Image: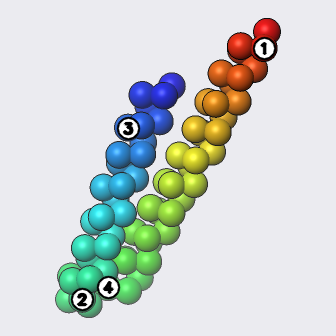
Amino acid sequence: MPLLSYLSLAATCSTTSVADLLFEAGGSLCPARLCGRYQMSAAMAFLSWFISSASSLFNFWLFSSL
């Protein structure tokens, strides 16, 4: 699970960098609606990573207390 979580974080960071690159490139490469979708998907991926890492830590804590 932790490996999958780190791979998810890496994919999220690359998505964020692509969204930032397209946003900074101007309107010719990235229409406003498309850039907004990239930014929203990156934000949701970060949120998903934080939730899955919190779940993983909680499960490790629960497993050690048994």
The residue at which mark 2 appears reads as 26
Q: Could you tell me which quadrant the C terminus lies in?
A: top right
Tags 4 and 2 touching, CB below 8 Å: no
The amino acid marked with disc number 3 is Leu
Find residue 31 and name its label.
4
Instruction: Nearest to the eye among marks 2 and 1: give it.
Output: 1
Q: Secondary structure at mark 1?
A: helix
Q: Secondary structure at mark 3?
A: helix
Residue 6 x %, y %:
42, 37
- Left or right: 56 in relation to 21: right
Q: Pointer 3: residues within 10 angstroms few (<14), some, or many (20+)?
A: few
Residue at left offset 28%, top offset 65%: 18
Classify residue 64 by image quadrant.
top right
First reached walking from the N terminus: tag 2 or tag 3:
3
Q: Amino acid at mark 4?
A: Pro
- Check disc 4 and report its element: helix, strand or loop: loop
Mark sitting earlier along the chain (1/4): 4
Nearer the observer: mark 3 or 4; the answer is 3
Residue bearing the label numbered 3: 7
Quadrant in the rendering for residue 31: bottom left
Q: Residue furthest bottom?
A: 27
Q: Residues within 10 Å of mark 4 (few under 14, many from 20)?
A: few
Q: As drawn, is 24 to the left or to the right of 34?
A: left
**Spatial separation of the CA atoms under disc 3 and disc 4:** 29 Å
Examine the image and state in which quarter residue 7 appears.
Answer: top left
Q: State the residue position of label 1.
A: 65
Q: Are marks 3 and 4 in contact (CB under 8 Å)?
A: no
Q: Circles 1 and 3: CB distance less than 8 Å?
A: no
